[in-house]
Amino acid sequence: MRKGSLNSVFGLPTILTVLIVLSVLGFASLSLVTANAQHKGLIQSLSLLEGSYQAETRALESVNAIRGEYQNGIAEIPLGADLTKVILAFSKTHPEVVWDKTQFTISKTSGKYTVTITVHINPIHSAQDFTILSQTLSIENDQDYTQDGDPIWKGPQ
């Protein structure tokens, strides 16, 4: 009887070794797949971040150029004067700017990113005539990334 029990114990170390090698290889391959997925996600996130910064920079450069031109145009006007005619004439010289009687809206697209900046212009000349009210970033898939960095679905427009 002892002879039969020795035969059953004889193959156990080999089976355990094979199982250990298989489990180590399985965990190693899962780790490799996870690291590869994280690398691809990081590259995509960095691309998104870089593109959004470029679009934002271009939009802010446009706003600053328009702000400088506007302030040069009203430099001679005394404080407290009505700027309605000046603003209307200014909006006609800039077709890329949408004017709705109280605000300018400037949209700049860079690649698949669109930055929209809304600027309030005070109709009575004061020290602070040109104020940025809002800035939104959207991507061509109609996602809006302006609320704490979380995507907001804007839907078809």
Image: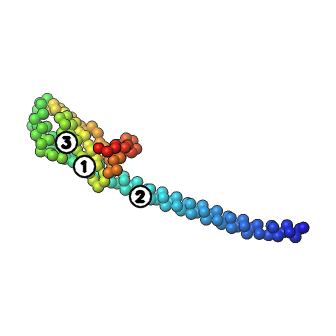
Q: Position of residue 76 (x, y in %)?
A: 9, 37
Residue drawn at the location 36% of the way across and 53% of the way down: 48
Colour approach in the figure? rainbow
Q: Position of residue 94 (x, y in %)?
A: 15, 45
Residue type pointed to by label 1:
Lys
Residue lying furthest top: 80
Q: Which mark is residue 108?
A: 1
- Where on the picture, by quarter, is residue 46? bottom left
Distance between mark 1 and mark 2 Cα atoms: 25 Å
Q: Which residue is mark 3?
A: 98
Other-residue count near label 3 (Cα within 10 Å), few / some / many at <14 / 14–19 / ≥20: some
Residue drawn at the location 56% of the way across and 60% of the way down: 30
36 displayed left or right of 147: right
Residue drawn at the location 75% of the way across and 67% of the way down: 13
Q: Where does the C terminus fall, quadrant-wise?
A: top left
Q: Is 20 rendered above or below residue 60?
A: below
Q: Which residue is mark 2?
A: 43
In the image, which is nearer the foreground, mark 3 or mark 2? Answer: 3
